[in-house]
Image (cartoon, helix red, strand yellow):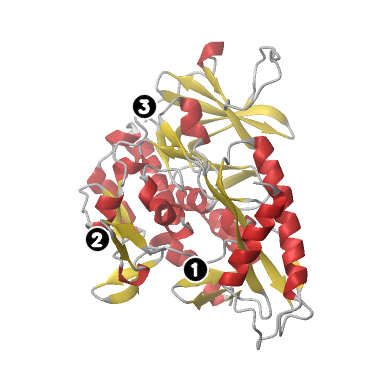
Amino acid sequence: MDRRKFLKIGAAGAGAVAAGSVTSFAQEPEKVKIASEAVSAQGYVSEPAREIPVVAACDVLVAGGGPAGFAAALSAARQGCSVIVLEKGGFLGGLWTGCAVLPLNCMGANVAGEWKQVVYGYAHELNRRLEDIDMSIFERRSPVVDPEATKYMMQVMLQEAGVKVLYYVQAAALSMSGDRIDSVIVESKSGRCAVRAKTVVDATGDGDIFFWAGDPFRHVKHHIGAMWRVGNIKEDNDLKRTPTPIPGVRLMHTPGEYDQDGLDLFNLSRLTEAMREHCWKRTQEIRAVRGCEDAYVVDTPTLVGVRVTRVLESLCDVDVDSVMTDRAYDDVIGIAGVDINMKWEGQVHKVGNRHPWQIPFRALLPKKTQNLVVAGRCFGYGDGITYDAREIGTCLVTGQAAGAAAARAVLERSAIRGINIKKLQKTLREQDVRLD
């Protein structure tokens, strides 16, 4: 699909919606896992062998500072573990704050005939803090936050918990010791270096860590779009788009191109250019709408809106039948709200009538790697629940559980899958997580 088609789809969409010890870092070269994907190669070069300095060590290493990574880091740190977050950008929040995906979706569902909030824990705590400074408003079924305030408040909460965040570092490879991750190798402005950890949380969104560790997954192509903000919109207007906590600022959205590979570097670059062009041109068109004559671009997304790429083949993937039949799990670590109408068994179930659903601990566990737990949009689930599973509220739920589990593994000197589930659930309840 070319750029014109991208713009056409976007404009149409907008109009329609008017354990234990850590082994030595020294490894045999073949045991160091590196990134690779099926992109067209024009030959190969050999990278010379070299020693990589270990620059830091911690109990829990969280790869990714999005909603899932934030919640994981906070959960582990509040249990007394030393925590380091690796973030490739210069801010926390991932697509939530970097792509203006501002609605905090999947926080609620139908409970006994009424729409109620079902997600609490750190998602609730963070939103309450934002409400206290007038940077979160309730719109339809979800809170809508301000991205800059959210970046700041997430930073404050991690600082309060003693979490160390390393910005501008790109996880690039792993050093493995059997079926355990010894260290994560990163690229940074200080060069190539490594961070050693007892347990690791994969909150990269794309499952980079479990991919390099050699755990099985599904490669999914999905829509890649964008959201952005426009300003100077009068209260009395015909735009009819989502308001934000900042008066006069509205949230815009384009679904972008369908069935796109978010792991292809060339494709991502092309889509980023098309997205930015669309945001600019669409905003100029908005000026013809009543009440929007002086509209301007507040910001375009720092990150293009990749919805899903790799999805873990976990010990227990959540599927549509489980969600729609209210399946209960003995190892439940949280409940998620709902985001869209769901087609199931030949019928469309309206979002307002759908129930919350449980997430089992096993859905966060890879089949091979012992000291790794997965959170965010790449945990184990089936195609049919992609929209519910990848939303911000669900990412915060799985992140909080993953961090709690990683910390319990350190405290119990156990592999993550061997921790005491009852103690994990007790910890989560103490952190205000609802399990039933």
Residue holding disc 2: 436
- Residue 242, above or below 73: below
Taking the spot 50% from the left edge, 76% from the top edge, the residue there is 139
> Within 10 angstroms of label 1, few (less than 14), some, or many (20 or more) residues?
many
**Badge 1 element:** helix
> Within 10 angstroms of label 3, few (less than 14), some, or many (20 or more) residues?
some
Q: Look at label 3 and name its amino acid.
A: Lys
Q: Nearer the viewer, residue 175 or 349?
A: 349
Q: Nearer the viewer, residue 230 or 408?
A: 230
Residue holding disc 3: 368
Residue holding disc 1: 127
The spot of residue 98 in percent (x, y) is: 64, 56
Taking the spot 33% from the left edge, 31% from the top edge, the residue there is 415
The spot of residue 302 in percent (x, y) is: 69, 53
The spot of residue 358 in percent (x, y) is: 28, 55
Q: Is residue 256 visible?
A: yes
Q: Which of marks 2 and 1 precedes in the sequence? A: 1
The Cα atoms of the two marked residues, 2 and 3, are separated by 29 Å
The spot of residue 275 in percent (x, y) is: 69, 54
Q: Look at label 1 and name its amino acid.
A: Asn
> Within 10 angstroms of label 2, few (less than 14), some, or many (20 or more) residues?
few
Taking the spot 41% from the left edge, 63% from the top edge, the residue there is 340
Q: Nearer the viewer, residue 45 or 430?
A: 45
**Badge 3 element:** loop
Q: Look at label 2 and name its amino acid.
A: Asp
Q: Between tags 3 and 1, which lies in front?
A: 3
